[in-house]
Amino acid sequence: MAETCPHLAYRTEGDGKSFDTARAFCTVTESFVQPMRADVCNARYGLDPAADCEFYVDPGASDGSETADR
């Protein structure tokens, strides 16, 4: 199982707004993610970002074409 997704970031501002609590942000989709999706990103509940996320990109891929099998 993969560890925390390398494409997950936590930001306290974005989309012209600021937040008191940092929110999960996907650097692949360039968007904030819902808490349930962040569970996948954080490999909670037996989930694996590389296998369970349709947006996952292998960080070792040189051109970004390596994605999870979806």
Image: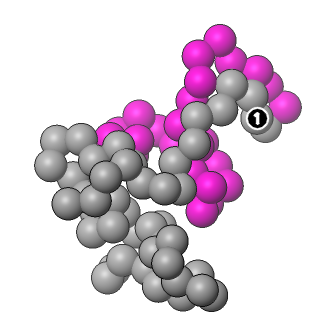
Identify the residue at image location x=59%, y=24%.
22
- Return the residue found at the far left: 46
Identify the residue at image location x=20%, y=60%.
1
Q: Is residue 26 magenta?
A: yes
- Return the residue found at the far right: 16
Image quadrant assignment for residue 16: top right
In this rendering, the answer to whether 59 lies above or below 13 is below
**Left or right: residue 18 compared with residue 25:** right
Image quadrant assignment for residue 18: top right
Identify the residue at image location x=46%, y=75%.
58
In this rendering, the answer to whether 49 lies above or below 36 is below
Say which residue label 1 marks: 14
Q: Which residues are magenta?
A: 16-40
In this rendering, the answer to whether 7 lies above or below 20 is below
- Residue 59 visible in rendering: yes
User: Where residue 3 sits: x, y (%)?
Assistant: 31, 52
User: Where residue 64 sits: x, y (%)?
Assistant: 58, 82
User: Where residue 38 sits: x, y (%)?
Assistant: 40, 41
In the rendered structure, which amino acid carries the disc numbered 1?
A: Gly
